[in-house]
C-alpha cells in the first residue's frame, strides 16, 4: 500500500484484497484515503478458510473509521458461470490514431436465436 500511495493520484480507485486481520496496513490505507484515492477493501474471513484471526473485529474497526469494506467468507466466491464463458467477453483495441475498435463481442442470445 505504501508503494501504491506513491503512484496513485487523487481520483484513482483501488481494490485491496487481504486476509490480514492485524491491521498493520491500516495507516497506509488511511494515507491513501486522505490523498483522494477511493479504496474498496475486500477482507477474506480467515476463520472460514481455516486460518486464525478475528475478521469480524477487523471489519468492525474498518467500518468505524468509515472505510468501505466487505467481508468475504469461504464459499461466497464462485467460478465464472459457464454461461458467461460460452457467451464471451468484450475486447477492444486502440489504434495508433486513438480510435477504439471492437475486436470481440459477447454473443447476444436474443439476436442469435432462430
Image: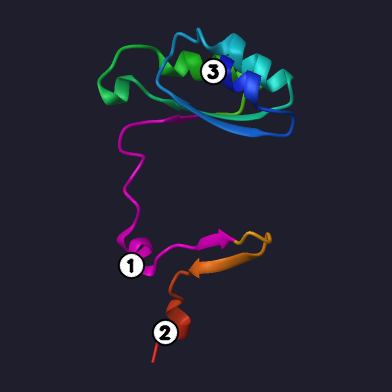
Residue range corresponding to the magenta coloring: 70-94
* 95, above or below 57, in the image: below
Is residue 85 found inside the magenta-colored segment of the image? yes
Instruction: Name the N-terminal-most of marks 3 and 1.
Output: 3
Q: Is residue 6 visible?
A: yes
Question: Which percent across, then down, holds residue 31?
Answer: 67, 15
Question: Which percent across, then down, holds residue 41?
Answer: 53, 28
Q: Secondary structure at mark 2?
A: helix
Question: Which percent across, then down, holds residue 45?
Answer: 38, 24
Task: Report the coloring of the rendering.
Answer: rainbow
Is residue 114 found inside the magenta-colored segment of the image? no
Q: Would residue 19 appear left or right of 103 to someone viewing this image?
A: left
Q: Which residue is most to the left?
A: 50
Residue at x-position 34% and y-position 57%: 81
Question: Which percent across, then down, holds residue 97?
Answer: 68, 61
Foreground: disc 3 or disc 2: 2
Q: Which mark is residue 60?
A: 3
C-alpha span from label 3 to label 1? 40 Å
Query: Residue at label 2?
Result: 112
The answer to which quarter of the image holds residue 19 is top left
Instruction: Name the N-terminal-most of marks 1 and 2.
Output: 1
Q: Specify few, some or many for label 2: CA neighbours under 10 Å numbering under 14, 14-19, or 20 or more.
A: few
Query: Residue at label 1?
Result: 86
Instruction: Name the N-terminal-most of marks 3 and 2.
Output: 3
Q: Quadrant of the C terminus?
A: bottom left
Amino acid at each position: 500500500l505504501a508503494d501504491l500511495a506513491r503512484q496513485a493520484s487523487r481520483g484513482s480507485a483501488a481494490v485491496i484484497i487481504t486476509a490480514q486481520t492485524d491491521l498493520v496496513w491500516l495507516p497506509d490505507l488511511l494515507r491513501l484515503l486522505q490523498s483522494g484515492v477511493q479504496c474498496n477493501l475486500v477482507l477474506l474471513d480467515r476463520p472460514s478458510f481455516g486460518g486464525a484471526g478475528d475478521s469480524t473485529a477487523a471489519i468492525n474497526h474498518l467500518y468505524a473509521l468509515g472505510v468501505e469494506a466487505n467481508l468475504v467468507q469461504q464459499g461466497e466466491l464462485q467460478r465464472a458461470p459457464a454461461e458467461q464463458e460460452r457467451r464471451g467477453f468484450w475486447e477492444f483495441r486502440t489504434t495508433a490514431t486513438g480510435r477504439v475498435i471492437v475486436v470481440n463481442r459477447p454473443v447476444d442470445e436474443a439476436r442469435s436465436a432462430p
